[in-house]
Image: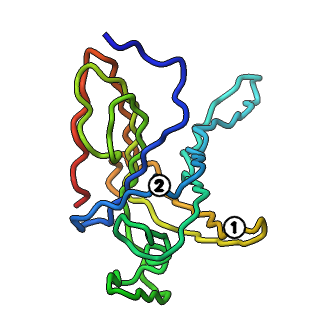
Amino acid sequence: MVALPDLWSERCWLSVQLKDDSEWQHFHPIVETVDMDEGDKDIEEFVTVGGGRLVKKVPQPMSTITLEAYPVGIATTTGDDLGFTQQFHGQTYDETSAKSSQTTHTWDKYRAVFLWTDETVTNAVGAIAEANNAVRYTIDEAYFTSNKWSFTDGSKKHTILLKFTAFDKSGSQNETVESCDADEELSAVSDYT
């Protein structure tokens, strides 16, 4: 039996898919850091005239995922020139030999999957076999809301924001978290339709 690690370190696998598109984009080769603020499930207090306290539940606000990345191109398929520009612009993907991207009024929805595992994998979306450990976050209805690039430290760097709400219009959840130890397995992530 493979024991769970003391912590997950060094490798995080990141895959993203445009809604109703059959291609997954695997961004882990160019992403340095990932930070997610899920928003607080907060409460507020009301003091009654009799001295009692009532608790009002505050709906969970929007969640933000921040990626620090080093793309050298703008392609939307996994390769040496993979980048975030076309996802942010919301245009029909240009995959010609020399790519071009123009900003649009389109707001595309994405599924983002983050995976930590001790199994040898090449992406975040495949099944994790028994005898391996893993934890996986699957985010639906996410939007690329920011693509800030800089060259302040002598390297072209992008700060990318993905935002999503805790629930969709029907009240269904937009985040699923899974984990397995060596006696269990995780199924592959389905296409985002």
Binning the other alpha carbons within 10 Å of mark 2 as few (below 14), some (14 to 19) or many (20 upward) gives some
Q: What amino acid does circle 2 point to?
A: Pro
Q: Residue furthest top?
A: 1
| For residue 20, side relative to residue 32 (left or right) | left
For residue 69, above or below residue 86: above
Q: Nearer the viewer, residue 140 or 126?
A: 126
Q: Residue at x 61, y 40 (%)?
A: 40
Where in the figure is residue 122, as x and y percent of width and height?
A: 33, 46
| Cα–Cα span, label 2 and label 1 | 16 Å
Q: Nearer the viewer, residue 96 or 144?
A: 96
Count of numbered badges drawn on the protein: 2
The answer to whether residue 168 shows anywhere in this view is no
The answer to whether residue 21 shows anywhere in this view is yes
For residue 189, above or below residue 76: above
Binning the other alpha carbons within 10 Å of mark 1 as few (below 14), some (14 to 19) or many (20 upward) gives few
Q: Residue at x 34, y 68 (%)?
A: 77
Q: Quadrant of the N terminus?
A: top left
Where in the figure is residue 85, as x and y percent of width and height?
A: 50, 76
Give the residue pinned by disc 2: 29
Asked which quadrant contains residue 20, the reply is bottom left
Mark sitting earlier along the chain (2/1): 2
Q: Quadrant of the C terminus?
A: bottom left
Q: Residue at x 47, y 42 (%)?
A: 12
Q: What amino acid does circle 1 point to?
A: Ser
Give the residue pinned by disc 1: 155
